Image (tube, helix red, strand yellow):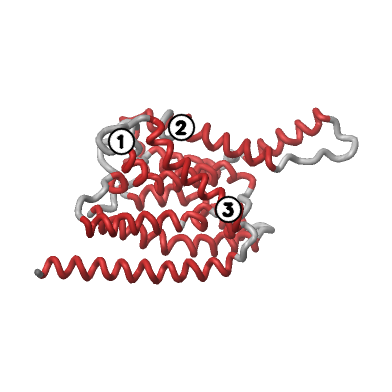
Amino acid sequence: MTLAELLSFLGLAWSRLLIFPGGLCAFVIVWLIGTIEHRRALPIAPPGCTGAAALRGMGAAALRALPGSSPLAASAVVLPWLGVALLPLPLAAPLARPVDLVVIVALLEWPRLLAITVDLHTGERLRGMQRLAAALNGYPPLALALLLTAEGTGTLESVGLLRIPEGSVALWWFWLGVGALILTLPPLIEAGPFALDAPDDLRFSMRLRALGIVLVAALPGIALLTRGGNEEWWRIALPPLALTGAIWLVHRNTRHHSAQRWAHVYLILDVLLALALLAAGLLALRERWA
């Protein structure tokens, strides 16, 4: 699917881009997150600096945090914006056809790839290597988790995360994949031992990306609470809010831990998920041959 195709059928559901889940709704959430982060790290005014000057300094820092006007900086906002807009959230305008999870994840991950490139080609080479290491810790379990959910639902389309399987075996693989996806969130959104500062021009984009990834992980919880057509707003908001709270607790308790030690944990998780996926494949072959 090309970018032109994405924009063409999103144009039929323009409210996804401009209101919900992308657009106004997503940007307000990202703005609130940025405001909370700035309040936690208020700059200390230098001696002799008046309150107005301090406010001007904060305003300048906020402006520097916004993406610039270059095409790459614009793509850092546009692509994750599209990724969030394509999420199959209840109450959102219907799409002409479903979108693969691979497409959505690729759109969301673009700012991170830009951040890695920026860090490696500037004076933040160490941070770039750490960000690359966090990505390499997150991508393998992410892929395995999505394959396990697909084993349960029979599809890699994004709407598959909203379809809770009926059979006991399929249900088992589905929730195993969902649990693995949630466990993969710290390296994916750079939280806890993998926490890193984003380049100034990419802060907004990285927050938008993290919002999209949390929403992807929250889709099964949303499906569980909205079964039977109960699509009240609190049923949609509760799973991502609960995930955000859990991530915050993990981040607070593990941000000073060694990322290398946690890398070993995720390596073990990769092996266990690979074995589970192998078992799922063998069971599927057994059923086909029976």
Query: Which residue is disc 1 drawn over?
Result: 9
Q: Which residue does the image show at 43% across and 28% down from the upper left?
A: 19
In the rendered image of this protein, does residue 220 appear above or below residue 283? above
Residue 23: which disc?
Answer: 2
In the rendered image of this protein, does residue 230 appear above or below residue 246? above
The residue nearer to you, when weighing 117 against 193, is 193
Residue furthest left as drawn: 290
Which callout, 2 or 3, points to the residue nearer the camera?
Answer: 3
Q: As shown in the figure, which amino acid type bears the numbered disc 3?
A: His
Q: Quadrant of residue 289?
A: bottom left
Quick one: label 2 or label 3, which is nearer the N terminus?
A: 2
The residue nearer to you, when weighing 21 against 281, is 281
Q: Quadrant of residue 11?
A: top left
Contact? badges 2 and 3 (CB < 8 Å): no
Q: Which residue does the image show at 24% across and 67% down from the upper left?
A: 281
Element at label 3: helix
What x and y, as percent, mark residue 209?
49, 46
Quick one: label 2 or label 1, which is nearer the N terminus?
A: 1
Query: Which residue is disc 3 drawn over?
Result: 251
